[in-house]
Image: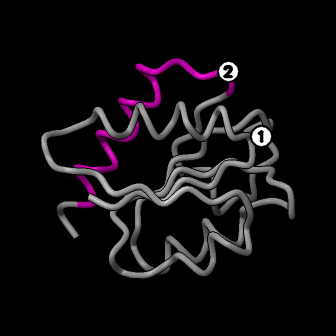
Amino acid sequence: MIVLIVEDDPLIGLALEALVSDIGTEPVLLVLVSSRADAMVEIDARLDLAILDVDVSDGKTFDVANELQLWNIPVVFVSGSNPAHLPVDLRAIPFVSKPFSDAEVRGHVEAATVSSSMR
């Protein structure tokens, strides 16, 4: 499983890496980036899942989420932003508010992983 994590806070990025690494029985390759620009470079069919912070150093990740959806790659938002401020077309994406509980992130990641294995 290959997971893209877009998070500009290094400590939160490490916490998400650790959490995702412990999910499932399959080895996990993590790609951790801190900007929209770097995330766009990493998008391709090999990804199984993406975890996005909404606000990163170079703006909002809405364009990243839209591009991931074009590739049919499941997305989970983990963010301190208000989910009501998401564009209407992105409101169906699971949203976990920071500070997050491991159980809540794990549940969404596991559900997304199931849908990813079906594509």
- Nearest the viewer among 77 and 35 is 35
Crowding around mark 1 (Cα neighbors within 10 Å: few <14, some 14 to 19, many 20+) is: few
Chief secondary structure of the magenta span?
helix
At label 1, which amino acid type do we have? Ala
What residue is rendered at 13% in x and 41% in y? 25
Q: How many angstroms separate mark 1 from mark 2 (CA)?
A: 17 Å
Residue 73, horizontal then vertical, whole percent: 41, 67
- x and y percentages locating residue 92 in the rendered image: 54, 51
User: Which stretch appears magenta?
Assistant: 98-116
Left or right position of 74 against 38: left
Seen in the picture, residue 110 relative to 116 is either above or below; the reply is: above
Q: List the residue tagged with mark 2.
A: 99
In the rendered image, residue 115 lying in the magenta stretch gets the answer yes
The verdict on residue 9 being magenta is: no
Q: Quadrant of residue 72?
A: bottom left
Residue shown at the point (49%, 80%) measured from the top left: 70
